[in-house]
Image: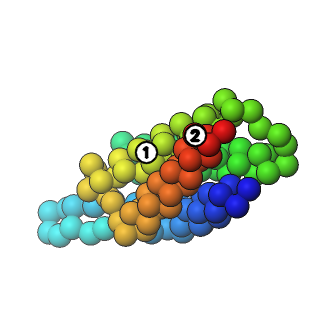
Amino acid sequence: MKKKIVSLVSLAIALILEIIPYGVRLKWADFYAERYTSHSYFSLIPWGYGDMGPFLCGILTVVLLLMLSATLILKEKKWYSLTVAILNLIAVILSIIPAFFNSYTLIGFIITVLLAVSCEINLMIHINK
């Protein structure tokens, strides 16, 4: 039970960091200079420019929060904990995608670490069942 709460708290902190507009950095260049703009994970501007990872990662974080909240109330099956662990692993992978687009920030790195902590805890919960 304590592990689930730690996983839930790390996902909640990751969601808060995904909401603030410093998670994704986009580079704009014109003839004279380059400038950078920052966006939240739920902004559709990075999605429109081909960086789909942050938005999908944000949606998965919300889904994982709802699924883990449900496990605190309801009884869970073994396949349910495996599903949570796999979705969490997919969220970690999606949170790394901005690094390939040169739009990775410190907030994005902290989100990746928090998602990885939650993923590791959920895998431990599944293995111990």
Which numbered tag is attached to residue 66?
Answer: none
Percent across and percent down for residue 119 are: 52, 49
Percent across and percent down for residue 16 are: 60, 66
Judged left or right of residue 27, residue 110 is right
Q: Give amino acid for label 2.
A: Ile
Judged left or right of residue 97, residue 17 is right
Percent across and percent down for residue 45 are: 45, 52
Residue named by callout 1: 94
Judged left or right of residue 114, residue 109 is left
Q: Is residue 21 visible?
A: yes
Q: Earlier in the sequence, mark 1 or mark 2?
A: 1
Q: Nearer the viewer, residue 109 or 46?
A: 109
Label 1 neighbourhood size at 10 Å, few (<14), some (14-19), many (20+)? Answer: some
Say what secondary structure mark 1 lies in. helix
Question: Which quarter shows the C terminus?
Answer: top right
Residue named by callout 2: 127
